[in-house]
Amino acid sequence: MAKTSKISGLGDSGGQHNEGTLNPNTVLLRRYRVMGVLGGGGMGTVYQARDLQFPDVKRMVAVKEMLSPSPDKALREQTLKTFRREANILATLTHPAIPQIYDFFDQNERAYLVMEYINGSDLEAILGKTRSLPVEKIIEWAIDLCEVLGYLHDHSPTPIVFRDIKPSNIMIDHLGKVRLIDFGIAKNFVSAKGNTMIGTEGYSAPEQYKGNVSPKSDQYSLGATLHHILSRKDPRLEPPFSFHERPIPDFNPDVPDWFAAIIKRALSFNPQDRFESCAAMGAEIKTKMMGQGARDTSQTEVFDEKIANMQTVEHKWVFETEDEVRTSPTAHDGMVFVGSYDTNMWALDLETGEMRWKYHTDGGIASSPVVDPASDLVLFGSEDHTFHAVNYKTGRIVWTYTTRDRIRSTPTVAMDHVFFGSDDGNLYALVSSNGRKLWEYDAQSAIRNRPLVTDDMIVFGNSMGDIISLSLSGERRWGYRARRDIASSPVIYDKEDLCYVGSHDGYLYEIDANSGFSSNRFRTMGPVITTPVVHSGRVIFGSVDKSVYSVEIGTLREKWRFTIEHPIVSSPVVHKDKVYFGGTDGKLYCLDASNGQELWSYTAEAAITSTPLIANDTLVFGSLDYKIYALPIFD
Ligand SMILES: Nc1ncnc2c1ncn2[C@@H]1O[C@H](COP(=O)(O)OP(=O)(O)O)[C@@H](O)[C@H]1O
Ligand SMILES: [Mg+2]
C-alpha cells in the first residue's frame, strides 16, 4: 500500500500511525474531526468525522480518503483523477439512495471526499452478522436497487454504469433503506469498447472481463449480489458464472419461484437475454409481488430496527458468570471488578476480559464494589449480611464486617472510611483499612442506595422514603420524606449545594443540601430507581416509565427525553458529552447528551440493570444474561 507520507498543516491536533491511517481527533481542513474508521480497503480509508463548522450540533460526515498508491508521479496523478471523477459524478447526482456529497479536497498527496454519513451497515457486514435475512426485505431492497440503477443508467448526456455492484458497496441505513456507495469506478459510459476490466471477480458480468461494459453489466452484478444474499453462497468462492448450478430455492426455500426466476434472468450469460433495463427488472419484481398479495410489513419493521442496531459497535470481550449480573462494575489499575448473583466477586483484566481472581461470599451480590486505592482494597456487601474487604490484586480477604441483614447498598469511600447501609436499617461508618466501626446510625428501615459523602455531610435514603442527612460524625442534620422507597442514590450539584435523588413515588427531588428543604421536583410516570447524573447544567436520569430525562438544574424544566419500550433501571453515565445507560430491553444505549438523540446501541441477551462503567475507552456493564460485556468507545 501507500508509504506513510507526512501530514503537515492538517490542523490543530492529531497525527497518524503506520499504514497512514489518520488517528482519531485529527482535524482536516480545520473543519472535519476524525472520530473513527468506518471501513476501507482498495485505495484508502473511510472515516467517520464530525463537521466542526456546526459547533452547536453534532453533524457527522463520512470522509473517504484516497492515498497515492505509488511513488510514481504518473500513477499518482491517475488515482487522483479517478478520485476527482468520483467526486464530480457524485456531485451531480440527486437520489435518495445516493449519499450527498459535501466537499472535496486534496492535501499532502491524499485526496478527501466528504459526504453524507450513513448510519448503518454495508451488506457484506450484515451478511457476516446474520444467518438469514427476511426475503420480503430483500425484495424491497431489490426494487430500490433497480430503481437507483435505472436512475444512473438514464443519466444524461451519458449513462453512468456503476460497474462494481456487490454487498460491500451497498449500505442499509438506520431506516432499513438501501444506499449505493463507492462510486470510485463508476464512469460516464461513452463507448463500450476498449475499457479495461474494472469490477470485482465473482460479481462482474462476463462481458466486463472483456472490457465491454454496459448498463446490463450492472444488472448482472445486482443479480449476483441478490443470489449471494439469498443463497448465502459467496460467488467469489465459486467458479465464475456458475450461478445456474446453484439454484436459489435449493439453499433458501423461503424465496418465491418468481423472484428466483427474475434473478436467474438478470444473471444470463448473454446480455441480450437479460431484462431490457434495470428499470424493467424492477417493474417485473413489483408486478409479481403484487400478484403475491400484501407483504408482511410487521416483520419488516422489527427487522429494520435490528439492522439499524447492527452498526459499528462490536464488543471487545464478553465474560460469563454463573448467575445474573445486576450490579455495576468498578475499575482500578487495569482491572475491573463485578459482583454477580452467583455469589462471587469477579476480577477481570480490563483489556482482555481474562479472569484474575474470583472471591466467593455466601450470598448473591447485589451491591456494586468500590476500590480504596489507599488500602489496596475492593469493598462490597453481600446478601450473606456481611461487608467484605478484599485485596484487589490477589482477591484475598483482608477483613469482613457482619450486619443483621442483607447488604445491597453500594459503599462510598471517603476520608479513609467506608460508608454503607444495610437492610437492617443502619448506616455504617467503618475504618476502611481494618473494618473497625466508627459509628452506626439507625435509620429505621432498609438502606439500599449508595450514600453521598461530601466534605461535611452524608446523604442517603431508606425504604420508607426518608432522605436523611448526617454530619460526618453520624449526627442527624435534616430529613425529608418522599412518598415511597428511595433506591436511587443522591448526587450533589456543588455550585449551588443542590442535591438530587429519585424515588419510587415517580419523582426526582431537588433538595437544598444545607437545609433539607425541597424546592422543586419533577414527575415521571414510574418509579425513579436510577441515580441521576449532573452534566452541564442539567440532571439526567431514567425512570421505570421507560424514559430517560434531561432536566435543567434549578427549574427542572424538561430539555429532552428518550423513550424505549421497557423500564429503565440502569443509571445513566455521561462521558465526553454522551450518555450511556442500559435498558431492560437488553440494549445498552449511547445518546448525544445535548439533545438525547440516539447515536448507537448494543444488544445483550437479557435486561441490563447495571450502570455502565467507563475506563480507558472501554465501557463495561453486566446483564441478567449472566454476562459481563466490554465495548470499545470513541470520542
Ligand atoms: N457515507 C458513508 N457512511 C457510512 N459508512 C460508509 C460510507 N461510505 C463508506 N462507508 C463504509 O466504508 C466501507 C468502504 O467504503 P467504500 O466507499 O466502498 O470504499 P472502498 O473503495 O475502500 O471499497 C463501506 O463498505 C462502508 O462500510
Ligand atoms: Mg467498496
Image (spheres, grey):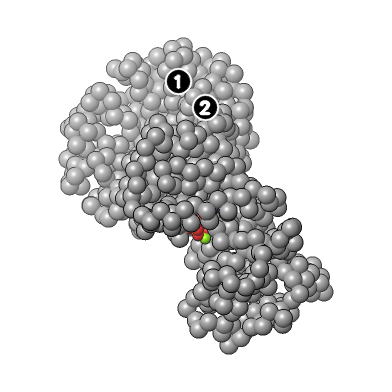
Q: Identity of the amino acid at label 2?
A: Val
Residue 47 versus residue 390: which sits nearer the camera?
A: 47
Q: Is mark 1 within 8 Å of ligand 1?
A: no
Would you say 107 lies left or right of 457 here? right
Counting from the top left corner in percent of width and height, residue 427 is at 34, 28
Residue at horizontal 44 percent and vertical 30 percent from the top: 489
The 10 Å Cα crowd at callout 1, few under 14, some 14 to 19, many 20 or more, is: some
Residue 518: percent from the left, percent from the top?
54, 17
| Label disc, if present, on residue 170 of the rendered structure | none
Relative side of 514 to 426, left or right: right
Report the residue that reaches farthest toward the front.
Answer: 74
Label pair 2/1, CB-CB below 8 angstroms: yes
The mark total stands at 2
Between 500 and 572, the one nearer to me in the picture: 572
On screen, residue 134 above or below 91: below
Which part of the image, by quadrant, shows the C terminus? top left
Which quadrant is the N terminus positioned in?
A: bottom left
Q: Secondary structure at mark 2?
A: strand
**Relative side of 224 to 239, left or right:** right
Residue matched to label 1: 493
* Residue holding disc 2: 539
Give, as a three-letter code, the residue at label 1: Tyr
Which comes sooner in the sequence, label 2 or label 1? 1
